Amino acid sequence: MGSVTLNNVTKTFGQLSVIHDVSLQIEEGEFCVLVGPSGSGKSTLLRIIAGLEAVSSGQVMIGGRDVTTLPPKHRDIAMVFQTYALYPQMTVRENMGFALKLAGVPKPEIARKVAETAEMLELGALLDRLPKELSGGQRQRVSMGRAIVRNPSVFLFDEPLSNLDAKLRSQVRGEIADLHRRLSTTSVYVTHDQIEAMTLGQKIVVLKDGRVEQAGAPLELYEKPVNTFVAGFLGTPS
Ligand code: ADP
Ligand code: MG
């Protein structure tokens, strides 16, 4: 259902080549972390999977289906952003139900899904608040809730913790790990933080200058880094 495959994906912006021949296989239910320094192409690759950027060449498959030319709404994905991207004038309840409303889901079903998801994320008491009345951690949970209610085959996260302070960051990181244990939804998670990558990833893909340096299980990368960049980046002596 929710596997993600990239075949020989490249992306250029004008003259600038930012993704070079990336091939990647993410299994159904896997938590895959894309890690690499700023500018290495992580967000671009995630946006390509989401359908927010078109590839210059190559193929994107989700759940065994070629989605290369499909718009985001036909890809069965939901994205969680670093900036939450909540609608400021809508309550938590309305924010969480909005995508379902647009999709024409009947009201009672929206109410049920929002209530169920809010309970899972301990947002039940906050449903009538506006985003400005929430803490950063609560806003990020609402933004995850908004993704979860849609029950997508794949979650895409772009540095969801980077606007949180250190304490909240480790708390929400734990919540994301719990969520994956409960829902087992295929997840692609972008970060430049090695600790996030090592603690969350079942598979880690190390990017540098738009190329995959190495992909594998955390222990494999830790014990057998293919080069000094991977070793240095993941904090092991080379
Ligand atoms: P990361 O998320 O790893 O920091 P990005 O994917 O955002 O990296 O960016 C990779 C490269 O692509 C950078 O050099 C960035 O400046 C460039 N880039 C990203 N988006 C655009 C765009 N819309 N137009 C031109 N260049 C872009
Ligand atoms: Mg980025």
Image: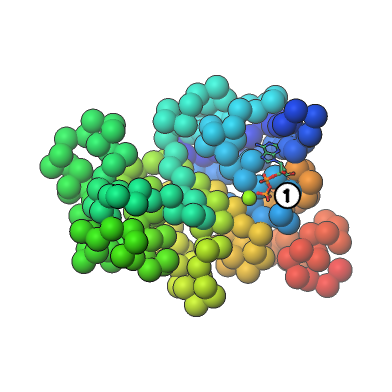
Residue drawn at x 25%, y 53% as measured from the top left: 91
Eyeballing the image, is 159 above or below 64? below
Eyeballing the image, is 149 above or below 18? below
Residue, disc 1: 39
> Does the image show residue 33?
no
Eyeballing the image, is 229 above or below 46? below
Secondary structure beneath dot 1 equals loop
Q: Which quarter of the figure has residue 230? A: bottom right
Of the four image quadrants, the one with ligand 1 is: top right
Q: Nearer the viewer, residue 220 or 23?
A: 23
- Residue 40: horizontal and vertical position, in percent? 73, 48
- Residue 137: horizontal and vertical position, in percent? 41, 67
Q: In which quadrant is the N terminus drawn? A: top left
Whether label 1 lies within 8 Å of ligand 1 gets the answer: yes
Q: Is residue 128 left or right of residue 162?
A: left
Q: In which quadrant is the C terminus drawn? A: bottom right
Q: Nearer the viewer, residue 186 or 106?
A: 106
